[in-house]
Each structure stands twice: as C-alpha cells, then as structure tokens.
Image: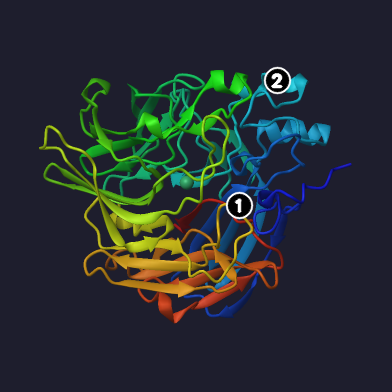
Amino acid sequence: MAQPMPADNPFLNFPYGPVRMECDANDLIVEGEIPKEISGSLYRNGPNQRFAPRGDYHLFAGDGMIHAFHINNGRVDYRNRWVKTAKWNVEDREGRNLINPMNPFDCDPDYSDFIFTDKDGLANTALVWHAGRLLALEEGHPPYEIDPVTLDSIGSWNYRGKLQTAMTAHPKVDPATGEMLFFAYMASGPFAADVAVHKVDKEGRLTESLMIPTPYPAMVHDFVITENYIVVPVMPITGSLDRAMEGKPPFAWEPDKGVHVGVIARHGGTADDVRWIEMDTSFVFHFMNGFDQGDVITIDCCLFDHAPLFPTADGSETDEARPFLTRLSIDLNDANARVSQTDVGKIESEFPICDPRFACRSYRHGWYTSLDGTLPSTLPNSSHFYNVIGRIDHQTGNTDHYSFGQSLPSEPLFVPKHKETEEGDGYILTVVTHFDTRVSSLCILDALNLAQGPIAQAYLSHYVPSGFHGLWRQAS
Ligand SMILES: [Fe+2]
C-alpha cells in the first residue's frame, strides 16, 4: 500500500506536493473571455513525486508530470500525465520509491547502479518544442519525447544516436534561424569537469558538438546565446563523488572556487577558443535574454549572491538567498575583462522571460515573477512566496506589475497577438494556484498592461503543483 508523504517536507506538501491522479478535464469553466487569437497549448512541467521518498527528498528529485492546457476558440481543455520514465516504471511495478536520483548511495540495494546507466532521468524540469517534437527536459539526462496532444510518453530522444550527453533544461532557439543550441554539464561522465555544447538545425539534425573542459565540476543550470556568441557560466555549485562517498553533499555551494564565464564564438568557435572571464561570486539560475553589439555582450538575469537550495561542502545550510534583476556586461575588447554587474531597478525576481521573437537580440521588454510580501512562505529560508508577475521596460526603466495576493503564479509565458506584432504586443499566460480554494487556474493578462489584472481565467478543480517551467506551443 502506498505510504503517505512526509508532513514535514514542504516540497511534498501544498503548494509543491504531488497530485496523485492523471486526468482529463474538458471545457474548463472560464471567467472572463479568452481572446480568440490565442490558439495553441500551454504546458507545465514539474516534480510530482509518485511514492513517498525512501530517504532524503530534494525538490529536484521528483517524478516529472506534464500538465497541458489546450486552447482553441475561447475553450480550454486540460490533461495531466506523469512522464513514464524507466524509474517511474520500475517503481510502479514495485509500488514504492526505490531510487534517489540525487544520491547513488541512497537507493534500494537492488537498484544501486540504476542511476549510473539510466537514460531517461526524471524529465521534470522544462519543455521545448523544436522541429516537430515536444521534449520534456531535466538537465542530467537526454530529452524525453512526449506526444504534444495526448501527453503519452514516447521515450528518450538522442538525435538518432548523435547525442551522447544530457541536455540542459534551458535550450535556446534562435527565432531568426530556427537553430537550437543547448549544453550539458559534467558531460563526459558523473562529476566530470566539462561541458558539451550542441547545435541542432531547424530541421532537428544535430550538426555540431563541442566538448569544453571547465575550471571545476559544476552544476550549470542555464546559459545564453546571442547572434554571435555562446556564454556558459560556471558558478560554484560543485559536484564531487568523493564527497558523496564520505556521506557529504554530492552537490554543494563552494564560493571559493569562483565564477568563470566561458565565452565562445557561436559561428566557427572551437573548444580551444573558449575565453574564461571572471566575475564576482554570485549565482544565476535563469537568464532573461542576451545580445551582442560590437564586441560587447549584454545579459539580463536574476542574480543571487549565493546559491539557494544547496548546502555548503560540509553539509551546513546557507542563509536565505534572494535574486535581483541584474544586467551583466562583458567587453571582449578588454584583454583584462571581468563581467560587470548593474542593478536593474532593485527588483527581486525569478523565472525571467522575454518575447521569444526577440531572443538573442537587442530587446525592450522582460517579464518575471516577483513578490509583494503578502503571501507567507512555507519554505525554510524563504519569507514569502512570489505572488506577483512583473514587467521591466529596459528602454524607459519603467515597470508594470500585478499582484495575485493569496495566489501563486507560475513562470510567465508570452503569446504574441499575431505573428508580426510589435515586441511585447500580446498576452502573458500563467498557471495560478489559489491558496484559499487550493485550486489552480490558467490566467491570461495583457502583456503590456499587467496592472489591469486578469483578462480571463480557466479554472481546474484541483491544483497544479508549483513546478518549474512551462512552454507555449502555437497551433499550426
Ligand atoms: Fe530552470
């Protein structure tokens, strides 16, 4: 019989805790009117632990579940499905949790080598739609293909045998060329000091792979591409097998290792050409956008002064970590260049995005989640949940925001009103979890007028666990 989730782990309880069902909910009740030009599917991905964990549970270790909101002509149909990975299947057969994906020394003895050979991973972090395939992503493994309508699990996808590494949860698609670039950290093996960078053309063919040694084995969550450069930030969440064998954290915050930002020419650059540029100690999960002008690279991101969610190397907890919107600049003309940092409006923020039609290029608008301090958090080292969606206009410095009060919005996603409209002329879609009713709704806002509040909301009768990332797939 399935065991209850531990009541003392906030990541296994509302609003993070798993829902225990897969379901279809057609023709959701809509408050307001969904603009008819919105036609396509919004997907969410996040950890949705199937069975009570056998030992320690980390938020990143839950089984992936995909939630889809298919929108057409003002109507919304919903469906959710677990990603039926190899781990999901063996645990389904045994009816209990066997594998701790974050720690090879915390698995059922019969599955002690499972995570060293597993190709599926958890598929629990993000999604990308590229060259006709919907891929569920989790940075430690290759992508996992999902049927975009039924959400059926198709299987691990390795670009016809060409992809020999994992894929980041944050691949970048260049809107001008359709090319997708991505990377993998610890690429040549567990805890290896390297990253692989891969390119896939708009037809879905893997065309180039570079293997790049890094200053130390690091967990790298996101990266940046511009028209002419690839930027890989090596920030000191380090990985160590020796540490894991001593019973200490396999992944830990080690600020003394420093920050090293690798810059590679996007066209024709080789592993030998990487330039490592140092930066003050800090940590970034997510980048908003980046662009180059001449030999100066500009990057916007949500910058922490230290990494959240990870202990130090001796296992002690770190203090509360808060991310602020920050502009980074790298002048490649300067032989002694360091990455410079400028605050952008002192905005505490996470899950930054841009209008994807303006990715990799000079741009104006960015959106993010933020907080107004009215929704108390249930998490350690976190005083309040992020209950605000905001926008920064980089051209004027003005901001615009909407607070959901006692409700928690997911990462915003931008949907243009029409293919050719001006930058920012569209809608922000977010899945909002309401703390009073414990249900979620798909919420639609005017992207350039967030403050006016929701244009429409489509309500579920259950909640979508607060996961990581989502995707908008425009109907063809
Ligand atoms: Fe992420």
Tell me if 216 is positioned left or right of 17 in this view. Answer: left
* Colour pattern of the rendering: rainbow
For residue 257, above or below residue 467: above
Q: Mark 1 points at which residue?
A: 380
What amino acid type should be assigned to the residue bearing mark 1?
Answer: Pro
Q: Name the residue under label 2.
A: 112
First in sequence: mark 2 vs mark 1: 2
Q: In this orientation, does residue 467 appear? A: yes
What amino acid type should be assigned to the residue bearing mark 2?
Answer: Ser
- Residue drawn at point x = 20 percent, y = 28 percent: 268
| Residue at mark 1: C-beta within 8 A of ligand 1 | no
The quadrant in which residue 332 appears is top left
For residue 255, above or below residue 439: above
Who is closer to the viewer here, 196 or 247? 247
Tell me if 298 is positioned left or right of 65 in this view. Answer: left
Who is closer to the viewer here, 352 or 225? 352
What secondary structure is marked by label 2? Answer: loop
